[in-house]
Image: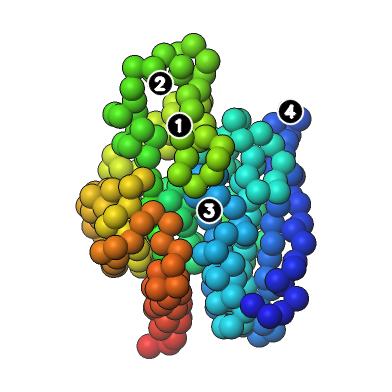
């Protein structure tokens, strides 16, 4: 990216009231004048933020195509306010919904990475229940829906269960940061209330999943399981044989941008009169 958005300063939107209020950082790229294409919405993963490689590359694609692009940091992430330890799927979903409603695009394409894929799937459900933008498509990178109940709880060690019971959280070494990952009892309990892999998921739009086969955090079998819950949608699953969880190498980014372009083309063709 070579335009003024490179050094764009975030705006802040207050979500919640009273003690639950937190300032959510947003960067919005406006669409070119006259464009009626859907806005791209970036949804980061657990402990990630809107300044990561994939998020910035998505914004660059929006600049190239003249599209709007909406990025946000969940509370406790990036430059947003709020405590990370207070975070739950419900809380971060509320923030993503509030940002989309605040920007108010007519149509959106959701691009979610890891936990952001879970948030995207819950957003799809919520947008169907409420007045809001039309969901035109989704691109999910190493999606981790229900990761608390599917990937964490079954593998808890005795000391981690004890820490959850006594301290309300447990820590796990992170391969991406010197700081450990922290998983709270509230996050795990709330995750059960936000499960999407317990029935049919009807997004009503095309979905493209990108999954590394050497992903140590979200096994590729998890992407296959997600496919089973999306029987009514036009779903493409692309496996990257040597891909890890991040899928941030140049070749991975090329796949991501191609997937987003494919969803945009699909959206455009559906808008054309028959």
Q: Which mark lies nearer to you, 3 or 1?
A: 1
**Residue 46 horizontal/vertical position (percent):** 50, 44
* Mark sitting on residue 19: 4
Q: Which residue is mark 1?
A: 172
Question: Which element carries disc 1, helix, strand or loop?
Answer: strand
- Image vertical order of residue 204 relative to residue 173, above or below: below
Q: Is residue 124 visible?
A: no
Q: Nearer the viewer, mark 4 or mark 2?
A: 2
In the rendered view, does 133 fall on the left or right side of 101? left
- Residue occupied by mark 2: 160
Label 2 to label 3: alpha-carbon separation: 26 Å
| Secondary structure beneath label 3 | loop
Comparing marks 1 and 4, which lies closer to the viewer? 1
The residues tagged by marks 1 and 4 sit, at their Cα atoms, a distance apart of 28 Å
Mark 3 neighbour class, 10 Å CA radius: few under 14, some 14 to 19, many 20 or more: many
* Direction from residue 177 to residue 236 in the image, left or right: left
Q: Residue at x 43, y 51 (%)?
A: 114
SS type, badge 2: helix
Disc 2 or 3, which lies upstream in sequence? 3
Report, in whole angstroms, how far the alpha carbon at label 3 lies from the one at label 1. Answer: 20 Å
Q: What mark, if any, has residue 44 been given in the picture?
A: 3
Mark 2–mark 1 Cα distance, whole angstroms, equals 9 Å
């Amino acid at each position: 990216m070579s335009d003024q958005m490179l050094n764009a300063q975030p705006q802040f939107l207050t979500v919640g009231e009273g003690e639950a209020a937190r300032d959510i950082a947003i960067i919005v790229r406006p669409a070119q004048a006259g464009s009626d294409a859907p806005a791209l919405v970036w949804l980061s993963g657990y402990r990630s933020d809107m300044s990561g490689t994939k998020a910035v590359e998505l914004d660059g694609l929006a600049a190239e195509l003249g599209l709007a692009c909406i990025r946000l940091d969940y509370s406790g992430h990036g430059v947003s306010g709020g405590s990370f330890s207070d975070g739950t799927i419900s809380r971060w979903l509320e923030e993503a919904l509030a940002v989309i409603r605040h920007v108010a695009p007519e149509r959106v394409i959701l691009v979610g990475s890891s936990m952001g894929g879970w948030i995207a799937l819950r957003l799809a459900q919520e947008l169907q229940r409420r007045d809001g933008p039309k969901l035109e498509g989704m691109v999910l990178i190493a999606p981790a829906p229900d990761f608390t109940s599917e990937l964490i709880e079954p593998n808890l060690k005795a000391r981690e269960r004890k820490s959850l019971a006594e301290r309300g959280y447990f820590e796990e070494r992170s391969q991406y940061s010197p700081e450990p990952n922290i998983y709270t009892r509230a996050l795990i309990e709330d995750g059960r209330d936000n499960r999407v892999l317990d029935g049919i998921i009807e997004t009503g739009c095309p979905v493209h999943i990108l999954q590394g086969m050497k992903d140590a955090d979200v096994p590729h079998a998890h992407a296959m399981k997600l496919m089973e819950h999306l029987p009514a949608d036009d779903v493409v699953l692309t496996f990257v044989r040597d891909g890890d969880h991040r899928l941030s190498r140049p070749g991975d980014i090329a796949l991501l941008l191609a997937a987003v372009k494919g969803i945009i083309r699909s959206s455009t063709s559906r808008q054309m009169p028959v």
